[in-house]
């Protein structure tokens, strides 16, 4: 059984406060992009085995796919194992959610492969235990996320922008980025990403002003080349340019296919470049 695990970008990201449990309350909009890992699953008599095309990716119990499989077995008492092969296309440490998407794909696929009867609520609970953004990848498309990222409201977003994504050869640790941000327990106000995206999608000037990422300041200080990519995108005519997640990838939005192609060519030297067509969701809001 083979499946795809799609990545995401963050259409805005606010870190509102640090919680008493050590996590942070956030506000963001997760938006699925047409960039994916491929996972193949084959039943094994008893073991959980993982191989990957990326030698830098751990294949032990620290890997989210392995954690997802073990979590399912612990919950259900399944004795069967599985062999998982991961073809890794989504850059690691780029703020694109590749590991979380792989974990969600593992949960969904093994639930079918092991003939488990799990409710959407049970799957959501398992996903949230694996990581704050794993629940989003059970849904895909576009969703407004609050709390630590696991509280989701699907959005029927018609998004008329080409996305040019640049992933420089820089790995940014999310844990490091949160530590450097040093938010206290006094909550910052949300930016209202959801309403702006739904009601003013075509107003790129308002989007550019509203869609901010709180991690940019700390990441740009250590990695000025990432700021350089964002500034160059805007100078080249992008309607919006923003870092995704805790970085290091940066994306540009433009309604012009010609500009999108030109931007993709322009930044070919800066890292891996991906081009995604405009997205029109069929998900009910």
Image (spheres, rainbow, N blue to C red):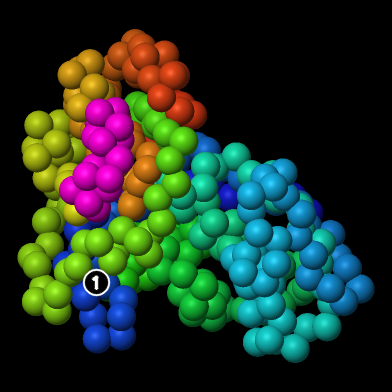
Residue 183: x and y, percent? 17, 69
Quarter location, residue 258: top left
Q: Is residue 220 magenta?
A: yes
How many numbered markers are drawn?
A: 1
Identified at 51% across, 60% down, the residue is: 100
Identified at 8% across, 65% down, the residue is: 189
Residue 165: x and y, percent? 39, 32
Identified at 21% across, 62% down, the residue is: 181
Residue 97 vertical placement versus 153 (above, below):
above
Magenta stretch: helix, strand or loop mostly = helix
Quarter location, residue 115: bottom right
Quarter location, residue 262: top left
Q: Is residue 120 magenta?
A: no
Q: Secondary structure at mark 1?
A: strand
Please report the bounds of the magenta region as a residue range: 215-230
Residue 89 vertical placement versus 277 (above, below):
below
187 sits to left or right of 71: left
Residue 223 vertical placement versus 265 (above, below):
below
Residue 250: x and y, percent? 33, 36
Is any atom of residue 181 visible in this view?
yes
Q: Count residues near mark 1 (Cα–Cα under 10 Å), then give few for <14, some for 14-19, many for 20+.
A: many
Q: Which residue is mark 1?
A: 25
Residue 21: x and y, percent? 30, 85
25 sits to left or right of 114: left
Q: Seen from this angle, which residue lies furthest front? A: 222
Is any atom of residue 161 visible in this view?
no
Identified at 84% across, 73% down, the residue is: 47
Q: Seen from this angle, which residue lies furthest right? A: 45
37 sits to left or right of 162: right
Could you tell me which quadrant the N terminus lies in? bottom right
Could you tell me which quadrant the C terminus lies in? bottom left
């Amino acid at each position: 059984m083979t499946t795809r695990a799609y990545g995401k970008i963050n259409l805005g990201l606010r870190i509102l406060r640090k919680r008493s449990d050590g996590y942070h309350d956030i506000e963001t909009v997760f938006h699925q992009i047409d960039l994916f890992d491929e996972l193949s699953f084959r039943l094994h008599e008893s073991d959980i085995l993982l191989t990957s095309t990326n030698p830098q990716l751990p294949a032990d119990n620290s890997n989210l796919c392995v954690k997802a499989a073990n979590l399912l077995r612990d919950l259900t008492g399944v004795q069967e194992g599985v062999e998982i092969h991961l073809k890794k296309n989504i850059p690691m440490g780029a703020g694109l959610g590749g590991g979380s998407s792989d974990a969600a794909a593992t949960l969904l696929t093994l639930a079918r492969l092991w003939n488990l009867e799990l409710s959407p609520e049970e799957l959501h609970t398992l996903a949230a235990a694996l990581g704050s953004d794993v629940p989003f990848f059970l849904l895909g498309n576009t969703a407004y996320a609050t709390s630590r990222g696991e509280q989701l409201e699907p959005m029927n977003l018609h998004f008329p922008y080409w996305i040019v994504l640049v992933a420089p050869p820089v790995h940014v640790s999310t844990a490091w980025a949160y530590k450097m941000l040093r938010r206290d327990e006094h909550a910052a106000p949300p930016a209202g990403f959801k309403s702006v995206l739904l009601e003013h999608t075509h107003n790129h000037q308002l989007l550019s002003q509203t869609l901010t990422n709180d991690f940019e300041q700390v990441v740009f200080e250590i990695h000025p080349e990432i700021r350089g990519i964002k500034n160059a995108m805007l100078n080249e005519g992008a309607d919006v340019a923003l870092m995704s997640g805790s970085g290091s990838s940066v994306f540009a939005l433009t309604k012009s296919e010609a500009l999108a192609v030109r931007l993709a060519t322009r930044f070919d030297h800066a890292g891996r470049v991906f081009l995604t067509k405009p997205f029109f969701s069929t998900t009910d809001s």
